[in-house]
């Protein structure tokens, strides 16, 4: 990183080719929607498959029942290496059986378990879970390498189906018997064409209709994400030894003269306004915040871009502030606004009252025992430890309680939701 200027993680955004990513280019938000949408389908599909497998006795094809499968698999591999096909088993040879069983019962669960480790909500509620994998990065590496293993398996599998005896194999796959082979070949090829066409269409459509895709996929993803992750509370208690020696920055400090003036005078004139649907609107100075009960916590921060860092934060429980301003019954969301503007849009994010009242959700005015440094959001920022970093508005200027966030900005619930198409619930 250059030493002569502030360097943020957004500066490192690189684009992916649409050929290997959906939709590719600089669309992390869109890629995440497709990722989660497909993951839901893949998991459902997998469960149905496994239930049917055990419900029908089909598991006998996949699950080896004798140790002899290992030497036999080695001998089958040797046969393949000589470009011959080993004798078929019932119906698979030993190497196929081991491979398929490995994909279904080892790789798939590993993918699900390591995927869950990417969730800040799960990592916050069960910090021990990350340690199972040796940390967040090892979990991500295992997740990615398992994906490569699945892709490798698919390629080898399709290749062998094709070179061994394509019409016969397709008939077996499609009909379950060996007649009408060319019908099966056509059905199979059309299936592949549909898959490719769907992929191309989804990519092109996502690139031209990002907002619609964000909303449509969001209808499937958000309810599930809310149901699974939203109620988890952060119970992080990292120790001083866990503190990251370097905590990255994302988002440049505000450049407005107003903020400059406040910063120049040590933020003594700064006020946090808390208003909207409340009984008692508040104007809180730093001294007011410091006079409230102080809460300190060492937690892991997860940026949507992948990096994480452990820091010590101190401030006021947001629940305390809510108790003081007394939200009206109609208030459902908090809209937090920062002083920074990007191409005319102010940074804002929304959270609902559930995470707002979680015990480790605080308005932090200290980081690692010093007043919150400006790059990290001085004088005050939100810490909502079960969510991704995007939610934790820095350089706070106001909190507004609202009934709905759809009439704000582009209606997606936050600056990065509006401009980068992220989802409003940020538990993974
Ligand atoms: N006001 C404001 N808050 C913000 C951002 C921003 O650009 N502006 N970036 C968010 C993102 S994406 C992350 S990961 C965290 C980064 O916090 P840090 O700079 O202290 O590491 O702040 C969040 N809060
Ligand atoms: Mo981020």
Image (cartoon, rainbow, N blue to C red):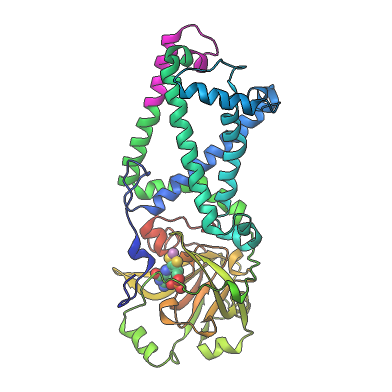
Question: Dividing the picture into quarters, in which one does residue 323 lie?
Answer: bottom right
Q: Residue at x 64, y 60 (%)?
A: 232
Residue 259 horizontal/vertical position (percent): 36, 84
Nearer-the-camera pick, 289 or 38: 38
Taking the spot 53% from the left edge, 18% from the top edge, the residue there is 86
- The image quadrant where one finds the N terminus is bottom left
Instruction: Name above or below for residue 52 compared with residue 254.
Output: above
Identified at 50% across, 51% down, the residue is: 141
Residue 11 higher or lower than 5, as above or below: above
Q: Position of residue 314 (x, y in %)?
A: 57, 80
Q: Nearer the viewer, residue 259 or 306?
A: 306
Residue 361, percent from left and from top: 59, 71
Q: Residue at 61% of width from left, 67% of height from top? A: 329
In the rendered image, residue 352 lying in the magenta stretch gets the answer no
**Is residue 315 something that shows in the picture?**
yes
Give the prevailing secondary structure in the magenta stretch. helix
In the image, 404 versus 286, the foreground residue is: 286
Which residue is nearer to you in this view: 109 or 49? 109
| Range drawn in magenta | 171-193
Q: How many marks?
A: 0
């Amino acid at each position: 990183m250059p030493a002569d200027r502030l360097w943020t993680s957004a500066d490192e955004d690189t684009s992916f080719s649409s050929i290997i990513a959906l939709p590719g280019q600089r669309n992390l938000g869109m890629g995440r929607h497709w990722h989660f949408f497909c993951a839901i389908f893949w998991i459902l599909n997998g469960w149905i498959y496994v239930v049917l497998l055990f419900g029908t006795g089909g598991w006998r094809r996949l699950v080896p029942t004798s140790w002899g499968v290992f030497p036999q698999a080695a001998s089958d591999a040797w046969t393949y290496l000589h470009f011959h096909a080993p004798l078929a088993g019932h119906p698979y040879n030993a190497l196929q059986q081991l491979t398929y069983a490995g994909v279904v019962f080892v790789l798939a669960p590993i993918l699900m378990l390591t995927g869950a480790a990417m969730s800040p909500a799960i990592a916050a509620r069960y910090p021990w879970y990350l340690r199972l994998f040796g940390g967040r990065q090892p979990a991500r590496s295992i997740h990615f390498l398992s994906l490569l293993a699945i892709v490798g398996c698919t390629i080898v599998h399709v290749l062998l189906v094709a070179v061994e005896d394509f019409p016969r194999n397709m008939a077996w796959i499609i009909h379950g018997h060996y007649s009408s082979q060319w019908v099966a070949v056509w059905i199979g090829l059309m299936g592949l064409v549909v898959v490719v066409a769907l992929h191309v269409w989804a990519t092109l459509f996502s690139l031209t209709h990002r907002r619609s895709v964000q909303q449509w996929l969001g209808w499937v993803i958000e309810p599930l994400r809310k149901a699974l992750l939203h109620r988890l509370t952060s119970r992080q208690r990292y120790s001083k030894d866990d503190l990251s020696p370097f905590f990255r920055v994302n988002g440049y400090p505000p450049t407005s003269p107003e903020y400059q003036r406040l910063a120049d005078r040590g933020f003594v004139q700064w006020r946090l306004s808390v208003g909207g649907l409340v009984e008692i609107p508040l104007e809180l100075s730093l001294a007011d915040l410091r006079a409230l009960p102080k809460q300190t916590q060492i937690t892991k921060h997860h940026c949507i871009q992948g990096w994480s860092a452990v820091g010590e934060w101190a401030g006021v429980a947001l629940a305390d502030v809510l108790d003081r301003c007394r939200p009206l019954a109609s208030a459902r969301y908090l809209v937090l606004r920062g002083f920074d503007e990007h191409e005319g849009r102010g940074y804002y994010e929304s959270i609902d009252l559930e995470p707002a009242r979680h015990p480790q959700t605080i308005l932090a005015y200290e980081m690692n025992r010093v007043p919150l440094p400006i790059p990290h959001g001085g004088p005050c920022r939100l810490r909502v430890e079960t969510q991704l970093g995007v939610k934790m508005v820095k350089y706070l200027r106001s909190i507004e309680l609202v009934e709905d966030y759809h009439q704000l900005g582009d209606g997606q619930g936050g600056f990065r939701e509006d401009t980068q198409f992220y989802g409003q619930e940020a538990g993974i």
